[in-house]
Image (cartoon, rainbow, N blue to C red):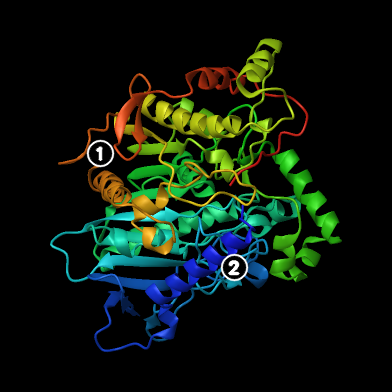
Amino acid sequence: MTPVSSRWKRLAALAVLLAAVAVLPASAQSATGSDPVVRLGAELVRGRRDAVPGVDRFLGIPYAAPPVGALRWREPQPLPPRAGPLDAGGYSPSCTQVTRRGSSILYPEIPDERFSEDCLYLNIWRPAGKPAKPMPVMVWIHGGGFMEGSGSSLMNQGADLAQKGVVVVTLNYRLGPLGFLVLPELAAESPHHVSGNYGLLDQIAALKWVRANIAGFGGDPGKVTLIGWSAGSASVNALQATPLARGLFQRAIGHSGADMNPSAGIWRLRTVAQANQYGQDYMKRLGAGSLADLRKLPAQTLADAPPKFWIMENDGYVFPGEIYDIFASGRQTRVPLMAGASADEWTVLSPDQGWIHPRTQAETAEAERLYGPPGRPNGHATADAVLWQARAWVRLNAKAGMRNSYLWFNTHAPPAPPRADGVAMGAYHGSELPFVFRTQHFIDFPWTAQERALSDTLSAYWVNFARTGDPNGPGLPTWPAYSDDKVMELSLTPHPIPLPREDSLRLLDTAFGRQRIEGGDNLARPGG
């Protein structure tokens, strides 16, 4: 959701202006002899000193060949040899995506929003100087419903977090139909006889680049934490499920997103046949008679054409089954996990009760008791569905023997102005992120001293987890591992609480149970 009131527009413009002053795009800065330089094999990479004291940044580093021309809708390919050193002084364009309506003050983006199909680049922030020992690495995967977003978002830039002794990596991946189109013609071209999930394969390619090269930036390739929000969190969930990413990361953090619903997915297409039909209908809407016709169309035309695109499960290559089943049988990559949701997810996401899929008369009656009559949007339905996803993810990870599994419930409402319709934002979708990344200075809210202290606390939890697989540390309120539905409430005074919304989650345990919904439109549900 992008606020449209004049107040929102003024605040958003101010946020972008402040961001442009605070972090001048490095592409506008000249290289100097004091710039940090990293050698990767025979290649030199030149970065810049960040405006944040004691931090170096390296922006716009390619991790795969540009997926253009004949490489559109193919797995990411190795980089061609480079002639000369790489000047990593500025952000790359973000991946082509649905036409933007401007940055929201809730989620400020880079000052100059440029988009291109040539977008497989990543950014690195590290503490300046030679570290005493290799540092933990935190790899950020952005959200945006698999349709939009950027690894260059100011809210999640890594300089302020890197000050705490970690290397932060953010990345772009292909989005929308360019990242997730499924067609029989594409499967026929593939050596694995599958199509779709190109965006996830991009993420895996970036992780392989990190494993091979991050030591040159002071990072420990054996201590990599995946962290994502919304669709990025669903990506972390998917990467933990796919065997193709095994060994590429050692911890996982998910903010408000997963694909743990075995009855009707929020983030996925359900069967190959349905996904192929989805893709063929998309071709018809564009007037394309063949794959060759599609490849001739401009990338922006492809991105702007409906419908939405999501993860394709059960493709037999990226996924050897549904994500829920992989976790339920303990076949996921077993790593420490932190995941959670916010109390008011719905103020950004849709408040539609379509997130809930009761199958019986008793379930329907209970859903009406909790959320009111069908057809009347109830925000708790959305918030509960997102919380259930996080809980299922953490619960099944703990069940597989990973005792270092932690669940949170964010209830703190930042001092955001209300939506254009007057609704208070509350603890909105992703509202904890500026606290974790210490990027409140990019968002023009009247932050309090207590909130700045909370940012110190939450960023310390996250960095501790990246370092040891346990968020706890000296001076921090104790965060219990998941057991008996213990949840860490993220408030101005973080503390453990019993599982919230228990009646609702009990309903979803049943409604999202093992029985599948047969027939009907089970392709995908709203997401952010």
Residue 499 higher or lower than 223, as above or below: above
Looking at the image, can residue 23 be seen?
A: no
Disc 2: CA contacts within 10 A as few (<14), some (14-19) or many (>=20): many
**Quarter of image, res 259:** top right
Name the residue at 51% across, 32% down.
389
Q: For the residue marked with disc 1, what is the amino acid?
A: Asp
Q: Which mark is residue 49?
A: none
Side of 74 relative to 155 (left or right): right
Measured as percent of width and height from the top left, residue 113 is found at 56, 71
Residue type indicated by callout 2 = Pro
Verify CB contact (< 8 Å) between mark 1 and mark 2.
Answer: no
Q: Residue 168: x percent and y percent?
A: 34, 60
Q: Position of residue 502 (x, y in %)?
A: 48, 19
Tell me residue 35's x, y (percent).
28, 82
In-front residue for pair 74/490: 490
Image side of residue 427 versus residue 476, left or right: right
Pick the front one: 236 or 450: 450
Front-most of 281 and 347? 347
Helix, strand or loop for disc 1: loop
Q: Secondary structure at mark 2?
A: loop
Q: Is residue 442 above or below residue 60?
A: above
The answer to whether 372 is drawn above or below residue 9 in the figure is: above
Work out whether mark 1 precedes mark 2 in sequence or the reverse, and give the earlier one: 2
On residue 67, the disc is 2
Residue matched to label 1: 470
Could you classify mark 1 by the number of other residues whose Cα lies within 10 Å: few (under 14), some (14-19), or many (20 or more)? many
Between the C-alphas of marks 1 and 2, the distance is: 38 Å
- Residue visible at 63% across and 26% down in the picture: 263
Camera sees residue 399: yes
